[in-house]
Amino acid sequence: MRKYFITAALIASFAAPAFAATTYYVAENAKTKKCSVTTKKPDGKTYLMVGTPDTYTKKSDATAAMKAAADCMPAPKTTTTTPPPKTTTPPKS
């Protein structure tokens, strides 16, 4: 009986990390330039990998890296300011 218990414990110790290991990636859509956190590895064509390290074990770490990555920052909004219209005053005589 003890032999079966030891065997089961060894099998469980090797199998447990494989089931619990979820890897997260920060990926940028090549077309839209928007970033997202995904569990599927980016292919390098449609989605590009962003950041270093390439993989994260926690989704919160990947999300924080995405928010901090320069590639994932939204483009700054350009505001055009229109100068006030020129007013002409009649010359004083």
Image (cartoon, helix red, strand yellow):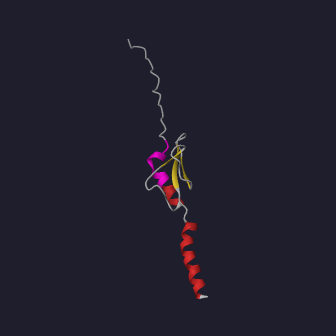
* Residue in front for this viewpoint, 80 or 93: 80
Type of secondary structure dominating the magenta stretch: helix
Left or right? Give the position of 30 relative to 88. right
In percent of width and height, residue 39 lies at 56, 56
Q: Is residue 82 magenta?
A: no
Q: State which quarter of the image contains the C terminus.
A: top left
Residue projecting furthest to the front: 3
In percent of width and height, residue 71 lies at 46, 45
Residue 50 vertical position relative to residue 90 in the rendered view, above or below: below
Residue 4 vertical position relative to residue 51 in the rendered view, above or below: below
In percent of width and height, residue 32 lies at 55, 40
Q: Quadrant of residue 19?
A: bottom right
* Residue in front for this viewpoint, 68 or 38: 38
- Segment colored magenta: 65-74
In percent of width and height, residue 90 lies at 43, 14
Residue ID at (44%, 47%)? 70
